Image (cartoon, rainbow, N blue to C red):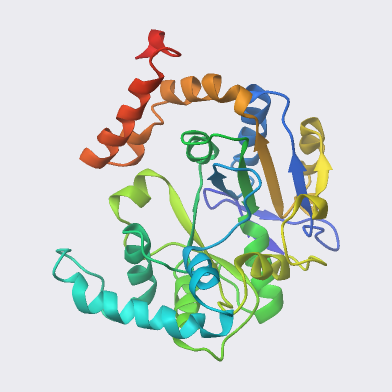
Amino acid sequence: MLGFGRFGYPFEYTGETMDNSIFYEINPNSWEDAKRIGKRLSHHTLRFLFRGQTNSSWGLKTSIERATEKYLDEYSWTWYFENQIIELFKSRAHQYIQSPPSDQDVIEWLSVIQHYGGPTRLLDFTESFYIAAFFAIDAALEDSCVWAINEVALGNSFLSKTGVSFWSKANKAVNYAQDYVLSLSKTDDVVLSITPSRLNERLAVQKGKFLFPCNITKSFEANLCSTFNFPFNKLKSENATTMKSEKLEEIVVNPNTWPSIVKINLSKEWYREAIRDLYTMNIDSASLFPGLEGFARSLNFIMRKSNYEDIV
């Protein structure tokens, strides 16, 4: 089976089958150890997407999933409300944005709604481990984490379940995602990696992508676990295989043993060192949120002055 690395270079999977149906959890020994893991998963021959979360005990949930749990009794009505949200937003958006998406570009509309904080089925990821680590650490009060999802395995799983390949046309995934939004009858329990046809400035700066659960009548984690044929539907620590960081090097050498999901836990004891390191990489709110909003957010760093006097 043919796959593609991060920059589009093709490689051939060796072996009869790919054993990607693995969920690993790693507890790095230090910030430097965490960086080595992130660097390894960011190698150009791999294709992992990253998401930072400020509490390591939190699972992966979309904003519309959280709204469903808060306001509705069950997921069966979520598809109806998603379409209502899209249509209502489209009817008013022209009053606030100069260049709205075309009426038919449902995924870009969802991207705009997500950008402004509305409930959608999109879950934000980035191609950068360091950006994900910043989002995990910046506002964290407890141990945080970075989730790493194997994008190649996502595409291969969708191919095996539906017979559809996205390798030849980048926008094909967006077209299929749109069909799942518009038709309740399409309910494959799989997750797609998608990029809107037009990127807003924030998404571009943050090297962002979205993960899209095709079956909105189930949780994001249920979709993701089904994608990788896991025998469970929640990404709990008890369902993960705990792995030492040095073991990762052996596993990622061979594409046939690349894991599907890696959860990298980050200890709050490293935050001072990590934030300082990320700051020197020009990864902070001012760089990740362009404009006055990002600059204002970055002023939180002033409150850490007693800890980081040498770099502020």
Judged left or right of residue 4, residue 67 is: left
Q: Quadrant of residue 230?
A: bottom right
**Residue depicted at x 35% and y 68%:** 108
Question: With respect to residue 6, does 160 lie above or below?
Answer: below
Residue 203 x, y percent position in the rendering: 37, 51
* Residue 291 shows in the view: no
- Quarter of the image holding residue 222? bottom right
Q: Would you place residue 162 above or below residue 126 in this image?
A: below
Viewer-proximal residue, 140 or 158? 140
x and y percent of residue 19 in the render?
82, 58
Q: Residue 163 vs residue 172: left or right?
A: right
Q: Residue furthest bottom?
A: 185
For the residue pair 155 and 22, the one nearer the viewer reads as 22
x, y percent for residue 128: 51, 41
Tell me the quarter of the image containing the N terminus.
bottom right
Give the farthest residue toward the top. 310
Q: Is residue 276 left or right of residue 58?
A: left
Looking at the picture, does residue 150 appear above or below residue 206?
below
Comparing 23 with 256, the one in front is 23
